[in-house]
Structure formats: C-alpha cells, structure tokens
Image (cartoon, grey):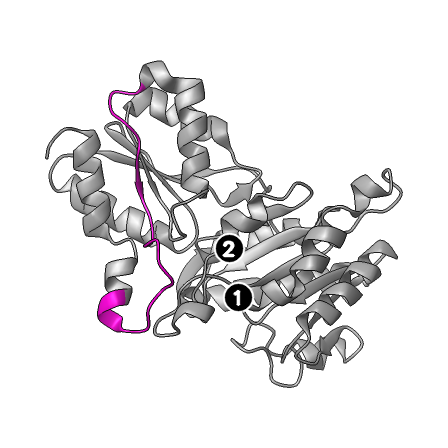
Amino acid sequence: MREVQFREALREAMTEEMRRDSRVFLMGEEVAQYNGAYKVSQGMLEEFGPKRVIDTPIAELGFAGIGVGAAMNGLRPIIEFMTFNFSLVAIDQVINSAAKMMSMSGGQYTVPIVFRGPTASAGMLSSQHSQAFENWYANCPGLKVVVPSNPADAKGLLKSAIRDNDPVIFMESEQMYGEKGMIPDGEYLIPIGVADIKRPGTDVTIVSFGKMMKIALKAAEELAKESINAEVIDLRSVRPIDYNTVIESVKKTNRLVVVEESWPLASIASEIAFMVQKKAFDYLDAPIVRVMGGDVPLPYAPTLIEAYLPNPARVIKAVKEVMYLV
C-alpha cells in the first residue's frame, strides 16, 4: 500500500491504461501543455506525445463529438470536461450519440468512451459552476455513471471505466483532487456497479457517494460517541446502482438515511428510497430520510453555501429522526 493524492490516482489509472492499450487517448481543454486544469494529467504529454494527449479549443460539443466518432471507429477516448457544468454544452453528443448508438445500430457499434471531470460544488463558484449532475446522467439508459469518494476507488474504477465497452460518465470532485489516501500496490480494478460498506453497523444505514461520503463518515464517527452504530455504504456508481447491498443493510438496521449533494427532485436518493420501500418495506421501522442540497441555485456567499450543503449535523439529526430520538 502507498499514499497518493486523488489526482495522482486518476493519473496512474490513465497512464497505466494508455501504456497497456495504444487505442486509449486523452482529449480536453488544457490537458496537454498545461498538464490539466487540476494537474490530473501532469507529465502525460511528455510520455505519450500530442497525438494521444490532445489539447482542444473551448468547444465541448465539438470535442465530445470527435470522441464519440473515435470510439465508434475502434479507439478508446478519455474526454475530460474541465467541469461537468460545461458538459451541458456537449450533452447532445453524450445523450443522443454516445448513450444511444449501440441500441440504434442494433449492436453494430459500441462507444467505449469515458467522459470525466469534476462535479458539484467547489467553494465560492456560484450557481453556474457548482451543480451536481449525477442524477441527470444516471437517468439516461446506455450510460454508466461512476462517482468515486477516495483515491483507491478512483484508480480502480477509472481503469474499469476505460476498459468498459459502454460510455461511462466518471465524476470527480474538485475539492478532493489534493486529498491523500492509501492505494494498493500493483494493478487492480474495481468493478462498476458494486457498492462498498465503508463502515459496518447495526443501528441505521447511511448511504452516500462521492465527496458526500466524508460527511456521512464524519456523522457516523460522531454518532458512535453516543453509542449509535451506523453502517455507511458508498454506492461508488449511481448507474448501475447496487440496490442489493443497500437493501440487505436495511434488513439488518431497519432504518435508512441517504446523503446527496444534488437538488432534491428526482435525485439518486429518491430512487434509493423508492427501491428500498418496494423491496424491504416490511423491514423499515421508520420513514426513510434524505439529506440533500438546497432546492435553489447554489449562491456565492459562504454563509449561504454552508446553509445549502449537507453537513454532519444535518445527517446526525436525520439519523436521530429515524431512530425516534428527537
């Protein structure tokens, strides 16, 4: 095991896959000469050259489309969006081309492409640069959507995403790029669609993904001081969702809190709540509670950002609600 930054884990995954398979290439804004907007691709231009690490104009629709065409013709592109807020400019290519091509061609074409970059809030960036679109992309058949929470998962999941024959949306957090964590030595892959129980427990199930896992785990630590034993599940991917791991946990704990940064309507948390009540209704001892971002465009002011985002105190309150302690 060794300690690396989140960005380094992503870089290792891309570098290892590009060494393994000459069809893999990286394309996006500032990925080459500038070493990446967040230095994820640092040093990759020097190793692989400008034909495999490609700087693009500020034209997300254009280079996303080039990536889809390249994937249809046998290559395996990694398309970096500087932020998934900018992916809205390219969403026609992602949704109407990448996601649908295999179905519309009767299986004659696959689109083995990864769209990756930072998602959700990252400080005082205001409404247009702080949006969480995980549930938007998870709503589209034909896509896989991965949201890692730590360096080890990021590396193993990104390697799996690059090897996948379906288009994968790989969503990171700008605020996590510098965070460090232990990763295994040698090559390893983590399968897409398998959740991970980060903290076993017996009293309540807390489900989350991405950087909100830090909030969930911090809340669980504080709850333990009050002898409340929370089981914390990291979904890791939100399409496909590992419903079974969540349901089996709820059958044990009989209570569920879901933590998610996005807006409440049609969220991943809503989907989880629906499936649990459908498959494990008789095991629930309390209504499911969601801890979500605010139902407003994210403001700029730090005090309003704090009020908008989930935090450990809100999660603790939600847990105590489902345990009838408040």
Q: Is residue 181 above or below residue 231?
A: below
In this picture, which residue range is highlighted in magenta? 284-304
The answer to whether residue 185 shows anywhere in this view is no
- Rendered location of residue 316, percent (x, y): 19, 43
Query: In the image, what residue type sits under mark 1?
Result: Asn
Q: Residue furthest bottom?
A: 33
- Rendered location of residue 130, percent (x, y): 43, 66
Q: Is residue 31 above or below residue 235?
A: below
Q: Mark 2 = which residue?
A: 133
**Where, by quadrant of the figure, is residue 233 drawn?**
top left
- Mark 1: secondary structure: loop
Question: Residue at 78% of width from left, 51% of height from top?
Answer: 111
Task: Measure how far apart labels 2 and 1 are at the Cα level.
Answer: 8 Å
**Residue 243: numbered disc:** none
Q: Mark 1 = which residue?
A: 85
Q: Main secondary structure of the magenta part?
A: loop
Question: Residue at 16% of width from left, 36% of height from top?
Answer: 320
Question: Residue at 75% of width from left, 59% of height from top?
Answer: 20
